[in-house]
Every structure is written in C-alpha cells, then in structure tokens.
Amino acid sequence: MEGRCERIAGQQPGALLKDLPALIASKNPKLTFDSRFNQYKVEYAENGFTNVFWLENEDTVKARIDIAKKYDLAGVAIWRLGYDTPDIWKTMIQHK
C-alpha cells in the first residue's frame, strides 16, 4: 500500500507509505473506495482532527498502468522512492 496523508484542519502530518498498514490497524479508520479517482480513501478522527489519506494497492496501480497503456502514454510514476512497498514494485514489473 501507498498513499498520501493530510489533516483536514491543521498541519499536514508526515507518514511513510510503508507505515500505513500499521497506522490503519491501530486507528480503526473508515475505508471507502473513491470511484472518481479509483483510489481508496481512509479517514479517522484523533485529537480533534479528521485525518484523511488516499492509498494505492496492487489493484489501483494495475488500473493506472492499464490507463497508460490504453492511451499509449510513456508510463506511470511513483511519488518518491522509499515510500513504496515491494508489492507495488512487483505489480509494476508484472504489468509493464
């Protein structure tokens, strides 16, 4: 899984993508699939803030690769090396 994390009210907290599974397990968040963006949205409340992050998994990465192929794009990109997980790379290599 990978994703970005932001606070609705307050400063944006930092979170490494590889740490998101533990964060999800510890916060009991609301997980929904946003069909507009083909991405998962995760929300949880803590210390008076609503924390929201969107995350990718193998299925959403494959969908993005399929879009790149459909429109004959040069490829897809990852936000920053080291924020990803081995599963994301495995999917990218299998579907390149």
Image: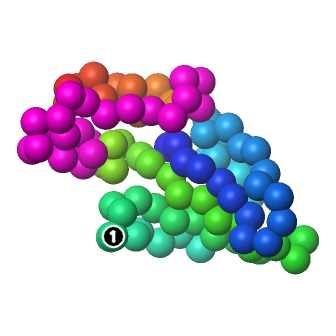
Residue 73 can be seen, yes or no: yes
- Residue 55 is one of the magenta-drawn residues: no
Residue at point 20% right, 28% down? 74
Question: For mark 1, does the 10 Å Cα neighbourhood hold few (<14), some (14 to 19), or many (20 or more) residues?
Answer: few
Residue 76 % position (x, y): 31, 34
Q: Nearer the viewer, residue 77 or 32?
A: 77
- Helix or strand or loop: what does disc 1 sit on? loop
Residue at point 33% right, 70% down? 36
Residue 28 can be seen, yes or no: no
Residue 94 % position (x, y): 23, 26
Q: Quadrant of residue 93?
A: top left
In the picture, measured across the screen, residue 43 lies left or right of residue 72, that is: right
Total label count? 1
Residue 32 % position (x, y): 47, 72
In the picture, measured across the screen, residue 66 lies left or right of residue 40, that is: left
Residue at point 50% right, 52% down? 55
List the residue tagged with mark 1: 36
Q: Which residues are magenta?
A: 62-83
From this view, report whether residue 66 is shown above or below residue 92: below
In the picture, measured across the screen, residue 8 lies left or right of residue 64, that is: right
Q: Amino acid at mark 1?
A: Arg
From this view, report whether residue 37 is shown above or below residue 80: below
Residue at point 40% right, 59% down? 39
Q: Nearer the viewer, residue 49 or 1?
A: 49
- Residue 68 is one of the magenta-drawn residues: yes
Quarter of the figure that contains the C terminus: top left
Residue 59 % position (x, y): 31, 48
In the picture, measured across the screen, residue 29 lies left or right of residue 31, that is: right
Q: Quadrant of residue 24?
A: bottom right
From this view, report whether residue 54 is shown above or below residue 36: above
